[in-house]
Amino acid sequence: MLGSINHSSTLSILLYPLSPKPGCCSSRKLNVRTHPWEKSVEKSVKLRTMVVGCKIENQEMGFQASERLYLGMDFGTSGARYALIDKQGRIHAEGKREYPNYMKEDSLDWALSWKTTLFSLLEDVPVHLRPLVASISLDGTSATTLIIDSKTGEPLAIPYLYNESCPDALPLVKSIAPMNHTVCSGSSTLCKLVSWWNNDDSDKKSTMLLHQADWLLWLLHGQLGVSDYNNALKVGYDPEADSYPDWLLSQPYAQLLPMVKAPGTSIGHLKGDIRTQFGFSEDCIVCTGTTDSIAAFLAARATKPGKAVTSLGSTLAIKLLSTTRIEDARYGVYSHRLDDKWLVGGASNTGGAVLKENFSDEQLEKLSEHINPMEASPLDYYPLKSVGERFPVANPKMEPRLHPRPESDVEYLHGILESIARIEAKAYMLLKDLGATQVDEVFTAGGGAKNDKWTKIRERVLGLPVSRATQTEAAYGAALLALKGCQ
């Protein structure tokens, strides 16, 4: 099923504990069995739900019983969250679930786990708010791929996870794709598709490829074969041309590709049996989704070119909204389409993981109190956890540089924080040199956003206003997509 874009303007420890082995992605047979979702919600799955002002009258928020709400869900690596917002972006309820640990022979049954969690989240939405939900959208991890039966929607193989690599397919993909294309990575969706195609001997006439978000949304709307151009990027979809390229359409497995629409596009109404089961309204619609990283960017509400989000987690990742599309495989830089703009991104190997190797959380907090952020550190480090850097310096042999170490731990921490800020500044400069819109404001997500002294250091080094993003949860970004689908 092929199609083009609709031109609408617009941690738990369960972190995939059974890591896929590097190499050939074969032997993915899956004996399909039906698991009624109504009976599969386990009470043992950990649950946290927070309801914000959920009385019917909700006078403190000016909430009217007739006001419509918008539901977003985020399916991350270890669990899923939901956020329920109104048109003004106020959160009325939110919650999270860890994925239940279902086994299928020797492997985790991820499809059943995700499906169970999806309906658990719907059940977690406060009963009296469900009739007010006007639309639903969700995000999934990028390049998490399912091969399904195009008639029943049931998975025919074990899902390929976002971080799973299929190097056996890489030479063939490189032979058909343009040089340095986004698909020219062993973990790309296209490599996973090619690997399955070449190693599975079953009948391929009634098969289809869907991404994690696509499949979960299908469970809600019932129309097989619909994706979005953010998820479809790594299977080879060209978001600028609004179509699959000829070099991809000429391949025998092109028949498996889904039609593609813009994220936040209405697909259809929520299935009747689900509406009846949970008490959602008859006019509730389901919208196309996006990837988890894009949803997290949307949550920051950085809507104008030049606005950027730096994520200071275990690594340093930046995303910049640009009027120009940038692609450079040398640095791992590529662009996602956001309506008529481009979300340009790159990730460095520096970040919080290096800090955690040298300081405890308590030390980081106490030592930071003694740093003068307006004073530049003379120490010149390149903090890496191991050998190799890709962005903003493409050098797989780069050695970590964390010496000399001064006697003062305060000075040492100051030097590391300042050095990471310099790397961030160099990263934004590189994007500008590659042709992206110049950054003029930075919002911060991730654990590093909590360190006010670091924020002030970064402000001085970048020469830009830097602030903590008000919202950083991807589920909130997915809810904004649901809102978009109703406009």
Image (cartoon, rainbow, N blue to C red):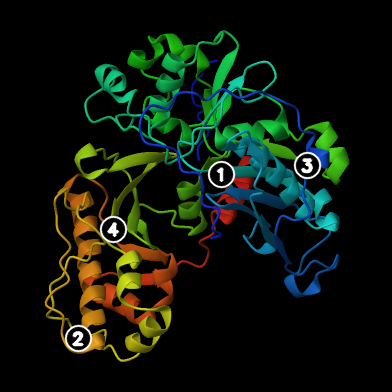
Whether label 3 touches label 2, CB < 8 Å: no
Residue type pointed to by label 1: Asp
How crowded pointer 2 is (Cα within 10 Å; few <14, some 14-19, many 20+) is rated as few
Please state the horizontal and vertical placement of residue 16, each as a whole percent of the image. 51, 47
Chain-order first, disc 3 or disc 1: 3
As drawn, 437 above or below 266? below
Q: CA distance from mark 1 to mark 4?
A: 26 Å
Chain-order first, disc 2 or disc 1: 1
Chain-order first, disc 3 or disc 2: 3
Position of the C terminus by quadrant: top right
As drawn, 360 above or below 311? below
Classify residue 347 as left or right of residue 251.
Answer: left
Q: Please name the residue that numbered disc 4 is placed on.
A: 439
Chain-order first, disc 4 or disc 2: 2
Classify residue 369 as left or right of residue 193.
Answer: left
Picture disc at residue 139: 1
Please tell me whether mark 4 sits on a helix, a strand or a loop. Answer: loop
| Residue in the picture at 82% in, 44% down | 280
Q: Please name the residue that numbered disc 3 is placed on.
A: 40
| Residue in the picture at 15% in, 85% down | 406
Please state the horizontal and vertical placement of residue 92, each as a whole percent of the image. 71, 63
Q: CA distance from mark 3 to mark 2?
A: 57 Å
User: Which image quadrant for residue 81?
Assistant: bottom right
Name the one closer to the observer, 2 or 322: 2
Name the one closer to the observer, 355 or 215: 355
Chain-order first, disc 1 or disc 4: 1
Name the one closer to the observer, 366 or 296: 366
Whether label 3 touches label 1, CB < 8 Å: no
How crowded pointer 1 is (Cα within 10 Å; few <14, some 14-19, many 20+) is rated as many
Q: Please name the residue that numbered disc 2 is placed on.
A: 375
How crowded pointer 3 is (Cα within 10 Å; few <14, some 14-19, many 20+) is rated as some
Please state the horizontal and vertical placement of residue 251, each as a whole percent of the image. 39, 11
